[in-house]
Amino acid sequence: TFTPAAVLAAITERDGAPGVLLLHRPSNMRSHPGQIAFPGGKIDPGETPVEAALREAHEELGINPVDVRIIGTSDLYRTHSGFEITPVLGLVPPDIEIVPNPEEVAEWFEAPLGHVLDPANHVGQWVEWEGSMRAYYQIDWQGHQIWGVTAALLVNLSRRLKWHG
């Protein structure tokens, strides 16, 4: 049984150089401490994935839902930790005001969409986890190491869009 969750891939509408908003989780969080993530979380009863992604983006980064133009959703992603994540793609203004919630966000940044979707930047890695070797992707950008579920969602999106860099 998987717990439904949703994330917002907030893409900035920059002419010629769109970006994607990402955040670092605080190191003291119970779930995914210190990791880079999209804003997102569990889908509450009665909520759609889009509603959940917008709610979480508002709670975590202060993004007003009316400032997000929803493009649609991408492929479901099931995690080893028991979540079934719906990525929600949305466009936001390039100058959108970000007001991070310090309880949920240690830092936020905007990475170039072209960089994170470029297969040349998707580096395969291996780690021993719970007694077996597991493969994962890592995407580096200006000292930020995007890996795990967030990198996997970006790799899946890149493949879905047939991105060639």
Image (cartoon, grey):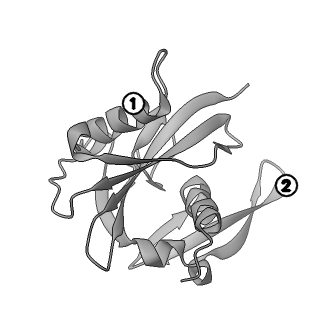
Q: Residues within 10 Å of mark 2 (few under 14, many from 20)?
A: few
**Mark 2 sits on what residue?**
132
Residue 128 can be seen in this image = yes
Q: Amino acid at mark 2?
A: Ser
- Name the image quarter holding residue 13: bottom left
Q: Quadrant of the N terminus?
A: top right
- Residue reaching furthest top? 46
Q: Residues within 10 Å of mark 1 (few under 14, many from 20)?
A: some
Does residue 73 sit above or below 157 in this rendering? above
Using the image as rendered, state which of residue 143 and residue 88 is in the foreground.
88
Q: Percent x, y for residue 91?
A: 32, 55
- Left or right placement of residue 158 versus residue 27 in this view: right
Does residue 73 sit above or below 52 in this rendering? below
Classify mark 2: helix, strand or loop. strand
Classify mark 1: helix, strand or loop. helix
The structure residue drawn at horizontal position 21% and vertical position 58%, both measured from the top left corner, is: 93
Q: Amino acid at mark 1?
A: Glu
Q: Percent x, y for residue 81?
A: 67, 38
The structure residue drawn at horizontal position 67% and vertical position 43%, both measured from the top left corner, is: 79
Residue 29 can be seen in this image = no
Q: Percent x, y for residue 3?
A: 62, 27
Using the image as rendered, state which of residue 65 and residue 77 is in the foreground.
65
The circle on residue 51 is 1
- Name the image quarter holding residue 138: bottom right
Tell me how far mark 2 sits from mark 1, CA to CA.
36 Å
